[in-house]
Amino acid sequence: MKGEIATTMVVVALITSLLALGCGKKERETPAPKTEQKVPAPKEEKQHFIAYETLRQWTPPAGGVGMTILVAEKVTKEEVLALAQHLRSKHSSTKWLWVDIFDSKEAYLHRDDPNYPEKKYSKHWLVQVFRNRKTGEDRIDWVAEGRDH
């Protein structure tokens, strides 16, 4: 008799549990519509600089950064100077910085050629960025001759 009561109690407990869990047929609940919150993307203040190619990059023995940059011949003086400022700022922690910017690969490749016309070379070597913290020099110079655009 005790066994029958225990078995009955187990069966009642199972049925109660199943009913509590909702095993019976029930209507499908319609989920609440999702509301999409459009979060505005963070505003990035990106400055756009002209495209350039790094022709040469080196690290001097005493540390720092040296590089030669090539830009398109069609870019303006203002665009080149903005790029020079950007590169100088990008390397602001360096004690020594040397950047030459050309708009002609030919002129760059003939930089050590004494037979290459000086006038042509001077027209395509546009900017020199120079910093030497030891001497206090930190400048951007427009060095192009015959090209003021």
Image (cartoon, rainbow, N blue to C red):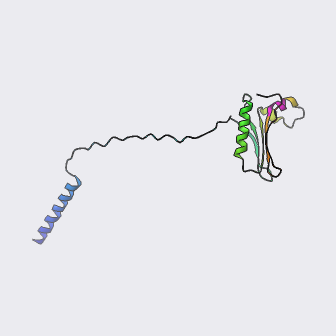
In the picture, measured across the screen, residue 115 lies left or right of residue 20, that is right
Could one spot residue 118 in this view of the protein?
yes
Query: Is 9 located above or below residue 124 in the figure?
Result: below
Where is residue 109, by image quadrant?
Answer: top right
* Secondary structure, magenta segment, majority class: helix
Looking at the image, which residue is at 74% across and 50% down?
Answer: 94
Looking at the image, which residue is at 37% across and 40% down?
Answer: 35
Q: Nearer the viewer, residue 83 or 54?
A: 83
Could one spot residue 53 in this view of the protein?
no
Position in image of residue 26 (x %, y %):
21, 47
The verdict on residue 94 being magenta is: no
Q: Check the image and name the residue furthest to the bottom.
A: 2
- The N terminus is located in which quarter? bottom left
Q: Nearer the viewer, residue 18 or 84?
A: 84
Position in image of residue 2 (x %, y %):
12, 72
Q: Check the image and name the residue furthest to the left.
A: 1
Q: Check the image and name the residue furthest to the right.
A: 114
Position in image of residue 117 (x %, y %):
87, 30
Where is residue 138, by image quadrant?
Answer: top right
Looking at the image, which residue is at 83% across and 28% down?
Answer: 146
Position in image of residue 108 (x %, y %):
80, 35
Q: Which residues are magenta?
A: 120-125
The tally of labels here is: 0
- The C terminus is located in which quarter? top right
Query: Is 92 located above or below residue 53 in the figure?
Result: below
In the picture, measured across the screen, residue 30 lies left or right of residue 142, that is left
Looking at the image, which residue is at 46% across and 41% down?
Answer: 39
